[in-house]
Image (tube, coloured by chain):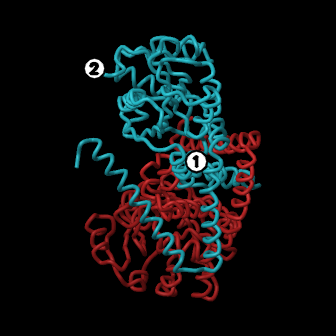
Chain colours: A red, B cyan
């Protein structure tokens, strides 16, 4: 086999939804890659090895990383710093999978003084409202995007190795700057999650919440699906990408107030214009997704 | 056959997603029910008859309703009044399928002076972001709820006939008061739709909207699914249930402001508490849905 990760040692720290899915996917895609999973719950680690999704496990980060070629840190954003400290100095290429990148750069600076050339900040844009190894699956990254945010001093070979990792899982790999990543994700992911958490919370505080949920239909279920996501993960995201999220949230609240006025004024034209424009944008987004699916399955 | 609608004439005015699905479902459930579809687009009406989903069609509301037993008015909320005027005085039981009920009661009062005893306001809580006859399907109402909001003077036999209609389509039928219906639906359906329309609109107005949509993941797609809904239908809903929607919207915006403060203060405890509470409520809602599905398929 000619894959860059053939015969190499891949250490996955935090084999939850993301890390577990990487272990499953790489096991299938590159059978001779030596995967070691590192975590705190020994029973889960043993299960992953028993399932054939890793060759070994450890609860000692430093020890596991000693002779690694590539280390993937897939833990909640605020835990990355502690893990980097345990990894310490290493010749291995290190990457992460956190949903925020500015905070991860800051964490690497606090640990290493400057961001090491062999550290490649990364973010696979794929997930689910479920979490943990038991929710993981090999196809999680297929036809999804992974964003890398290398710095000026990041080693090109390190970027190539991390790119090869995600591409072998079926993901398209793109690069962008750190602040750009955090602003785009605030708009497309962090704000929608906040809105869904807030809606469920607003309604569940009402005295009639039992009844409200009883009459809620499919639209409500889909709209609030992401409110079933892991609270710890999202806590960390808003603790670390709060400013970018609040910036787009303020634009959103301003639009809500405008719509509130439009509704109270029974401004028919403005309602039709807004809804038609939104539907058009949303339908264009779906066409874009369909076009990707087609191009990625080779059809036309 | 012993069904109340056996051998009866059912007139469906507005055979779109809802009306078309009723035509398909009743054709299967009660083959000897005489279905007549009424609309403006002759080609669509002919198609429905050609598909075997109605026995006849008409573009003349008054004529079609003359010897009807049951008339279903499934047109956008603001069009119901004009249709009731065309129906005029009738011995048939008349019901509607609009998502708001207060406005429909007002419309009936404007047309008839008082709400006739044979008029049963109704609302099947089921839909899709797609619209029109081509999106309709016989199973749309299965395992869903239909809410009827009869008034004090509504005829019990009329309520029973409309109940039989929706039950034969697989729906559970419940009754509640008009203001209660409009408040519950404002919270569970109208506000979420408004939030989804607003989010897509906010983002599509940004200079970077192309890019934002390019990186949007599955969470965003589900969250905004309902923003692909029919603008005319939702225009009518907010024109007619604006006050109830704004009332729950104001509670929501207040909660958003609280969360905004919590994020800017990096208030870790409050973030965890809010997200955990929301996840718990949402998971309870899913358990509730699962329990219904089980009870309705006869399992335990």
How far separated are the C-alphas under marks 2 and 1? 38 Å
Residue at image mark 2? B2
In front of the other: B216 or B71: B71
The quarter of the image holding the N terminus of chain A is bottom left
Q: Quadrant of residue A57?
A: bottom left
Q: Secondary structure at mark 2?
A: loop
Q: Secondary structure at mark 1?
A: helix
State whether discs 2 and 1 lie on one chain.
yes
Percent position (x, y) of residue B181? 51, 45
In front of the other: B179 or B225: B179
- Circle 2 crowding by C-alpha within 10 Å: few under 14, some 14–19, many from 20: few
Residue B190 marker: 1
Asked if residue A6 shows in the view, the reply is no
Q: Relative to residue A47, is residue A298 depicted above or below?
A: above
Percent position (x, y) of residue B133? 53, 25
Mark 1 belongs to which subunit?
A: B
Q: Is residue A206 left or right of residue A6?
A: right
The quarter of the image holding the C terminus of chain A is top right
**Sequence-first disc among 2 and 1:** 2
Percent position (x, y) of residue B229? 59, 40
Q: Quadrant of residue B79?
A: top right
């Amino acid at each position: 086999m000619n894959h860059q990760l053939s015969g190499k040692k891949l250490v996955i720290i935090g084999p939850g939804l993301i890390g577990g899915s990487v272990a499953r996917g790489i096991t299938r895609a590159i059978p001779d890659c030596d995967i070691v999973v590192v975590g705190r719950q020994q029973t889960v680690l043993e299960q992953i090895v028993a399932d054939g999704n890793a060759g070994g496990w450890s609860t000692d980060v430093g020890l596991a990383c000693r002779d690694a070629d590539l280390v993937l840190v897939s833990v909640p954003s605020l835990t990355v710093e502690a893990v980097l400290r345990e990894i310490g100095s290493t010749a291995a290429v290190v990457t992460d999978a956190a949903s925020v990148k500015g905070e991860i750069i800051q964490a690497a600076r606090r640990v290493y003084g400057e961001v090491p050339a062999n550290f490649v900040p990364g973010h696979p844009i794929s997930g689910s409202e479920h979490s943990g190894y038991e929710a993981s699956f090999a196809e999680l990254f297929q036809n999804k995007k992974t964003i890398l945010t290398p710095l000026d001093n990041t080693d090109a070979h390190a970027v190539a190795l991390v790119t090869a990792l995600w591409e072998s899982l079926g993901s398209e790999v793109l690069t962008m700057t750190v602040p750009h990543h955090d602003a785009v994700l605030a708009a497309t992911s962090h704000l929608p999650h906040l809105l869904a958490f807030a809606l469920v919370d607003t309604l569940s505080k009402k005295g009639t919440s039992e009844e409200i949920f009883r009459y809620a239909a499919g639209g409500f279920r889909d709209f609030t699906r992401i409110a079933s996501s892991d609270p710890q993960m999202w806590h960390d995201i808003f603790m670390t990408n709060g400013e970018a999220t609040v910036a787009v949230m303020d634009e959103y609240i301003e639009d809500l107030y405008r719509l509130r006025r439009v509704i109270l004024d029974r401004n028919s034209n403005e309602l039709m214009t807004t809804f038609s424009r939104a539907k058009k944008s949303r339908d264009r987004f779906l066409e874009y997704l369909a076009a990707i699916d087609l191009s990625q399955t080779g059809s036309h």
